[in-house]
Amino acid sequence: MPQLRLALNQIDSRVGDIARNSRTILDWTRHSAAQGAHLVAFPEMALTGYPVEDLALRSSFVEASRTALRTLAARLAEEGFGELPVVVGYLDRSATAQPRYGQPAGAPRNAAAVLHGGEVALTFAKHHLPNYGVFDEFRYFVPGDTMPVVRVRGVDVALAICEDLWQDGGRVPAARSAHAGLLLSVNASPYERDKDDTRLELVRKRAQEAGCTTAYLAMMGGQDELVFDGDSIVVDRDGEVIARAPQFEEGCVVLDLDLPAASADAPTGVVDDGLRIDRVVLSQEPVPAYPPEVSGGYAQRLDDSEEIYSALVVGLRAYVVKNGFRSVLLGLSGGIDSAICAAIACDAVGAENVFGVSMPSKYSSDHSRGDAAELARRTGLNFRTVPIEPMFDAFMGSLGLTGLAEENLQARLRGTTLMAISNQEGHIVLAPGNKSELAVGYSTLYGDAVGAYGPIKDVYKSSVFRLAEWRNRAAAERGQTPPIPENSISKPPSAELRPGQVDTDSLPDYPVLDAILELYVDRDQGADAIVAAGFDPALVAKTLRMVDTAEYKRRQYPPGTKISPKGFGKDRRLPITNGWRESL
């Protein structure tokens, strides 16, 4: 059987930074060539970053992508890599009108190309376009209608893009019909909790359907609210794992494969789902036989808490670095939410670039002030105290507020203080709200909701505690100081806006609340189904009412890392003005 050394580069691209992304692709191609690769691949839309959203509608951006692709092909040849096929995802446009989709010639396409000999040897567009969750690809792109096959060193390699594997039909069965020896899919599949297990089973299933070894190359990094976790996978035709890349790490997986030789009478014409085989022969002669030297390896899997925590770190780091910020600022209350956000920030950008502010009021307890200072000592972040009591007294003297208005004033004074420091010193503010609070509106607009990014926006309160305990445990296992004071984890959660206040004055216990919210928010279950799951009808009615009436608050909350199947943002799109209520 012919041999092929495959190099899968799970890189981090920045949306819109085509020049930087081109350099990254060139650098990793050099690395792959140095490893003796015969075929090199990069993720979906690696040249432009993903998702490009409405940039796809700008013809100037599309043309910049196309031009950069041709320039990259020429540059690869100039550097001596002309005979090394390189698969690159990019943004293209259709050459002809697409009347079936109501699109004229020139409509954008989510595409990939094979670069060889200084030229663009083959191009193809994604066949299945996702239109759910965070994906709007029918808004932007027209689908491809070919089954691209490139012959490399005597092996026919079928090519696909992301959703082509996630949906039934299309290029997977077409790869079998085309007698491919390898199916290579380039992807920009965002991270979600437990998605690694789903992804593995998917790739196994598709390899068996395609009847050939299947390589699933994934992107790594972060883009706004999305995180990409890498975790590239290669399985044989029976679905057995050959190699698996690390999670949340940029890098290159190189492995030697024994693959069936391309048949002399390989099929042509139209195959499954009306796809037309587009076959390009780059090199007919197999590689001279050699002893396999690289296996790709199997990276150790992260446990659930480490996986989620890693996603939060990568997401925050990407947002800070890719937007050109240098440092972050957050209020430190001594509570669990600000503590876990501070720990994430220190891990993401370094403690020297994290600035924490304690803003005690007359209701702040001594232990909360002490816990905030202890967190700063343990992590090494920059710390200061700015009491808000003088400001509070001045406002109260002018306005005479009472009740909830008095409580919210404290939160808004803290928000104003943070934004003032941010403007003065150039830090970006982190909002520490968790998903439980956002769901039920347990936050103050222009108070604790101010900020540029919400690191735990998509993390339920119950999970916040688990992550804090994991982070401390991980530090202890490494012989380091656990970053989060034990008192911040063990004490009852409280906003401390009035004497003796605790969260359970207004909310159910968080494990119960989060279980209801997961059914209602993440799974779109109605009131009847939630009650049938064993929850008190009155509590369900109250919780759902709080969720429904807080939509206007959530729309004004900053972006934050998505880790669940349905985060607040693009995933969950409900009208603010909405007369529908769940009834029992």
Image (cartoon, rainbow, N blue to C red):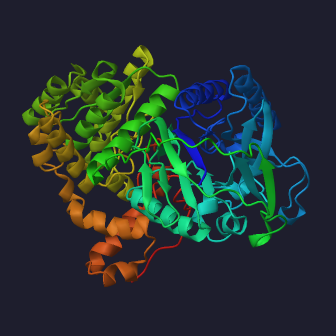
Residue 225 appears anywhere in the view:
no
As drawn, the residue found furthest toward the front would be 289
Residue 273 placement (x, y as % from top left): 75, 71
As drawn, the residue found furthest toward the top would be 425
> With 184 as the anchor, is 517 left or right in this view?
left
Q: Quadrant of residue 62?
A: top right
Can you say whether 540 is above or below 471 in the image?
Answer: below
Q: Out of 546 and 98, give the one closest to the viewer.
A: 98
Which image quarter holds the N terminus?
A: bottom right
Can you say whether 386 is above or below 366 in the image?
Answer: above
Residue 218 placement (x, y as % from top left): 52, 47
Which image quarter holds the C terminus?
A: bottom left
Q: Out of 186 and 2, give the one closest to the viewer.
A: 2
Residue 197 placement (x, y as % from top left): 40, 61
Residue 296 appears anywhere in the view:
yes
Q: Residue at 51% across / 45% down in the picture?
A: 256
> With 225 as the anchor, is 487 left or right in this view?
left
Q: Quadrant of residue 16?
A: top right
Q: Out of 362 and 529, give the one closest to the viewer.
A: 529
Count of picture labels? 0
> With 233 as the anchor, is 187 left or right in this view?
right
> With 458 as the anchor, is 154 left or right in this view?
right
Q: Residue at 77% across / 60% down in the picture?
A: 264
Q: Out of 580 and 193, give the one closest to the viewer.
A: 193
Residue 245 placement (x, y as % from top left): 42, 45
Q: Residue at 20% across / 26% down in the picture?
A: 379
